[in-house]
Image (cartoon, rainbow, N blue to C red):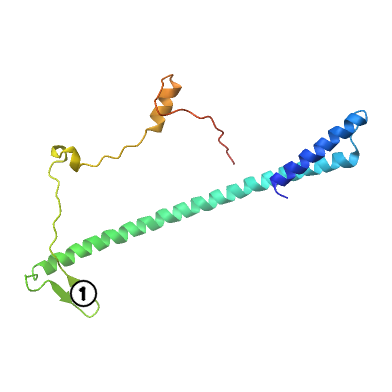
Amino acid sequence: MNLYQINLELAYLTERAWAFAEDNDGIIPEDLAAQIDELELAKDQKRESLACLIKNLKADAEAYKAEKLAFAKRQAAAESKIDYLAKYLQKDLEADVTDKKKKFEFDHAVISFRSTKTAVIDDLTALSDEFVRVKVEPDKNAIKTAIMGGETVAGAHLEEGLSMSIK
C-alpha cells in the first residue's frame, strides 16, 4: 500500500470510528482501533522508507557528481592535449603548405588546410551595441532582499514554501 492508499484507508476508518463512537457513548471497537493503529504504523514505516530511499538516492547522485567531475577533468586534460598537439602539428606542416599543396595523405590520416577568416576583437569597448551580445538574467537574491526590505519590485514577488531536510 502506498501513502495515498494508507491515507484514504485511515480517513475511511477514522470516519467509521467517529460515527461508531457517537452512537456508543464515545467507545470505539477494539478491532477498529487496532486497524487504525496498524495503518498509522504502516504510514510511519512508509515515510521512513521513503526518507531512507531519498538519502540513498542523494548519496548515489553525489557519487555520480564526483565521478562526472573526475571525468570532466580527464576530458579537459585530453582536450588540452589535443589542442597542443594539433597546434604543434599545424605549425610543422604550415611550412610545407603552398597554393598547390594543401593536403597531406598518410596511411591512417589525411590532413588538409583551407583558408578561413576570423574576427579578432582588439577593443571590446569600442564595438557598437549591434556587435555585442548581452545575456540578461534576474538577480533573484537581490530581488528577494529588496522585497524583504519592504521595496516593491515590478514583475516579481515572493512565494512562501517549505524546504524539507533529510538526514
Q: Nearer the viewer, residue 19 or 121?
A: 19
Which residue is at a point 45% across and 56% down the rendered structure image?
67
The single residue placed furthest to the left in the displayed view is 99
Q: Is residue 115 above or below residue 56?
A: below
The residue to which callout 1 is attached is 110
In the image, taking residue 46 as reference, residue 96 lies left or right, namely left
Q: Position of residue 49 (x, y in %)?
A: 67, 48
Which residue is at a point 43% across and 55% down the rendered structure image?
68
Quarter of the figure with the C terminus? top right
Q: Nearer the viewer, residue 48 or 18?
A: 18
Q: Is residue 39 above or below residue 160?
A: below
In the image, taking residue 23 as reference, residue 123 lies left or right, namely left
Q: Position of residue 72 (x, y in %)?
A: 37, 56
Rendered image quadrant of residue 101: bottom left
Q: Nearer the viewer, residue 26 or 53?
A: 26
Q: Is residue 94 above or below residue 61?
A: below
User: SS at mark 1?
Assistant: strand
What amino acid is at disc 1? Val
Which residue is at a point 51% across and 51% down the rendered structure image?
61
In the image, taking residue 20 as reference, residue 103 lies left or right, namely left
Rendered image quadrant of residue 129: top left
Q: Position of residue 155 (x, y in %)?
A: 40, 29
Rendered image quadrant of residue 28: top right
Q: Residues within 10 Å of mark 1 (few under 14, many from 20)?
A: few
Q: How many marks?
A: 1
Which residue is at a point 26% across and 39% down the rendered structure image?
134
In the image, taking residue 40 as reference, residue 119 lies left or right, namely left
